Each structure stands twice: as structure tokens, then as C-alpha cells.
Image: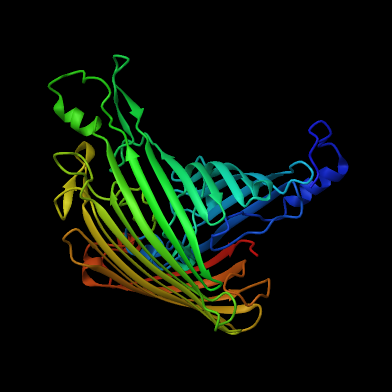
Amino acid sequence: MKMINNQSFNLKSSVFHKNFILSLFFLFLNFQAFAQINYEFASNKNFSLGSYGRVGVDWSFENGGSIGRRLNLNNMGSIGGRLEEQDYLELAPNFVFNPKKGDETVIHVQVRLAAYSTSLTSFGNTSTSSVGGLSFALPEIYAEARNIRGKELNIWIGSRLYRGADVHIADHFYFNDHSGQGVGVEYKNSRLSTIFVASVDTTSTLPPYFYLNIKTGTPSAALRQRTVFVGEHDFYLDENNTITALAEYHHMEKGQDGTLPDEDDEDVEEAVNFPSDYGYVLGFRYNLQLKKMLPGSFNDFTLRYGGGIANGGDGGISKTWLTFGAPDEETLRYNKAYSLALVNHTVMNLSTNYTMNAYVIYTKSKGGSSLNNLAPTYFEKEVYNRKEDFTVGTRHEFYITDFFHLLGELHYSQRKDGTNPIASMTKISVAPVYVPTGLRDIWARPHLRFVASLARYNDFAKETLYSPYLQFTGEEQWGYYFGFKAEWWLWK
């Protein structure tokens, strides 16, 4: 690679300008090597643009006809099937820098822009000025140097979607979703990173990332940061068998900062100026390549245990720094909190005409409170202090022709909050798909789909309206969804 001379780097050069404009038509999204899907580089060596997106229209015939509602259970996200997901867009510009001549280091800076609607309104019918309109996020902005001096050494700094295994048909990144802002180093089969988490969201029921600061003489919210130390190592037993070990340590400093304005105001002290706390995670992942089947077939089994403030992961999200439940009523700590998460994910390419994708997800979590049902948390809020959920699902993809595929999905999902009875849903989906690339592959995109889903709820889910669909329709035993949907990415 040639070194870039900044003084001669002239954007007015017609050749460079032409390549720059053409590169905007290429899609690039660069996940780390252990991600499920790797997105390919555009042709321009110094700039590329990546994208992931989905968009469509959907409806039901309830209440005079309306936009479709997700059929999954509450607090489960896309676990239970993602074919009803709403519009979403990511754009990821990536800037590639060339090292000095003879150096094998790969250098890039990546930014990811995300857009979505905070209501159910479609992209085309809303804007940032609409009520419940478009929202924008910046989940990634980081710099990374890879293969430094040819030594299999990588270093990165910034905000990154730092995650690996994904049950795509449930939109669930499991086991090692360490996405956040921090710093990391990777050497051969080992990865070390530190994530720094802070927020001033005073409506959150998590251990607050803020405290009452009165050093200035005027009480004001100040940040309290959680520091997450992460270590991973891959053990390659042979070309078909890999084990990954995971360990995390979480720490939050105490929020006490001076004395309270009113010495008798102990409630404020307990609610805001809270003690230090910690948590830990241990886990392993076993990946088996199914060589007796067609290429791309595998089975992935993971088991993870988190204790203390590292017991998070709910709503379809597995980040361990999203603490679940309430603290102990007296100590305000999460010493007794825990979470056990098990995932098994498999893809079996059984023939050139058929692929089966299946998963099992089981999670059992408890907060720091001694209560098993609703428990008090910060600022007189209440949350469930215990939950258990289980989901099993399959996608069957039939390659009728190169360009026409047929998706069939079957999911069963159940959840128990606190001491409540179990809420459950069984869902079947059928989706004929036009695949313009003509690839017989479960990862081929874009997809142009027609989606029809039918769900049946048990009595408790029906009576408690335990689904976005039921919250709209009222107490119904059955729910349904129709839609035309598009989804795209580029991969290699």
C-alpha cells in the first residue's frame, strides 16, 4: 500500500472525485471476524459506505383497518420471530487509511448512523418534526488498527457494536454483546476490552448512573460511571470445533459526594447517593461446524451466568450491563442478583433446495431484592424482581427456484414475570420471497417478501394484553399480521 501524502491529497482531482462518488453506491458494513455476517468492502480503497435496512407496509383489519402490530409477547423484543419488525435503517461510512510502504497494518475509522421511528409510523409518512417521528442514533464511531505490523494485533478506541453470535431470525445477539463506548485490544485468539457506561436518564430503574452532587453548594445531577472489563479467548480444538471462554467484571463507584443539603433528608440519600456495587460474568460458547452437511452448516451452544449488577439482558437484548430487577431494600446493592442465559442456534443446509434455521433461548433472572414479585426501586418505582422466559423457533427456507424462495416459521414463546402465571404465544408465519440476486443461500439479500403471521395466546396472555397486538385489539385468543417487507445487506 502507498502512503497518503496529505499535501497531495486533492479532492478536486477528477479521478478521485469520480471514485468517491461511485463508492457511494456500494454497501459496506464491517463486523469483527467473529460476527455472524461479514459485510464486504467497496471498490474504493479509501472510502466505503455500508448499510443494513428494512422497510415495508403492514396492516390488520381491526378497528376499521390499521397498521400491523407485533405479535410477540411483551418484554421479548424480536424473540419469537422478527418478520413483523418495523422500518429501520443503518448507514456506515468507513474511511480507510494507508500505512507506510511495506507495512501490513490495516487502518480504518467507521461511523454508523441509525434511523427509526419512535412510533409505528412508516418512514415515508413521518419526519423528525412529527409526533413520535424519526429518531437518529450514532451507535458507532471508532478508529481501529488491524494486523499491526503483521503481528495479528488489533487496537480500537471509540463507540462500537462489539458483538458476535446472532440468532438472526430472532434478532438476538447473544453471549458476548459488549457494544458500547470504550477501548479494546485483540491479539491472535484473545480479546480484551473495557466499556464505560454512563447516563443521566433519571427515569431508568437500573442502578442510576447519576448522583446528587452538592460540592458547588447547589444540588445537581452528576454522572456515575460503570466500568466493564471484558476478556475472551478462542480455543480452536480442530478445524470444526471451537470453544470460547468469556469473563467480565463490572464496577460502579459510590454516589456519595459530600453531605446532603438537609441532614434529615435520608430518603434522598438512599434514592440518589447510593453505595458502590459490582458484578461478574462467566460463560462459554461451543461452535461446531457440521461438515457432513453442505457448507455453512453449524451448531452454536452458549451458556452464561452473571451475578450482581451484571445480571442484565431483557427485552430481546443480552447486554450484561443492563441490570435486571430491584436492589436490596436496605443496602441498595445487587449482591444477590443473578441471571442464567442459555442459547442454542443451528443452521443446517440439508440440500440445495432446503435450509433449516433453529434456536432455543432460555433466561432466568433475579434482582437484588428478597422479593419475588414486584419490588421497590429508585424514586418509588416498582419493577418485577424475577423473570423466566423460554423460546424455541425454526425457519424453513425452501429454494423453489433461484429467484423464488418460501419461508415458513414456527415459534413458541413463554414468559413468567415474578409470581404471575405463565404468558405464552405460538406463532406460525409464511413468507414467499423474491430474491433478485438469484442466490440459493439463507443469507442472500435483498429480500422482497409478503408476510402472513398467525398467533395464538394462552388465557393469561390474552387477559393481561401481554402483546403489542393485544394492547391494540383487546382480549383476543388469536392475532394476525400481514405485510410487504424488504430487507437488505451485502455480505461475503
Q: Which of these two is toward me, 115 or 389?
A: 389
Residue at the image point whose x is 24% and y is 50% from the top: 325
The answer to which of 82 and 107 lies nearer the viewer is 107
Residue at the image point whose x is 42% and y is 64% from the top: 285
Q: Residue furthest right?
A: 14
From the viewer's perspective, is 88 left or right of 364?
A: right
* x then y, percent, for residue 435: 63, 73
Q: Position of residue 67 (x, y in %)?
A: 44, 61
Residue 289 point in image, percent of width and height: 52, 74
The quarter of the image holding the C terminus is: bottom right
Residue at 35% from the left image edge and 44% from the top image edge: 250
The outermost residue toward the top is 217
Q: Is residue 352 left or right of residue 196?
A: right
Q: Position of residue 448 (x, y in %)?
A: 59, 69
Vertical side of 407 occupied by 195: above or below: above
Instruction: Reply above or below: 249 against 122.
Output: above
> Dividing the picture into quarters, in which one does residue 81 lie?
bottom left
> Image quadrant of residue 4?
top right
Total number of numbered discs in the rendering: 0
Q: Nearer the viewer, residue 400 or 170?
A: 170
Which scheme is used to colour this image of the protein? Answer: rainbow
Indicate the quadrant where residue 343 lies. Answer: bottom left
- Residue 415 in sight from this viewpoint: yes
Q: Judge whether residue 313 can be spotted in this image.
A: no
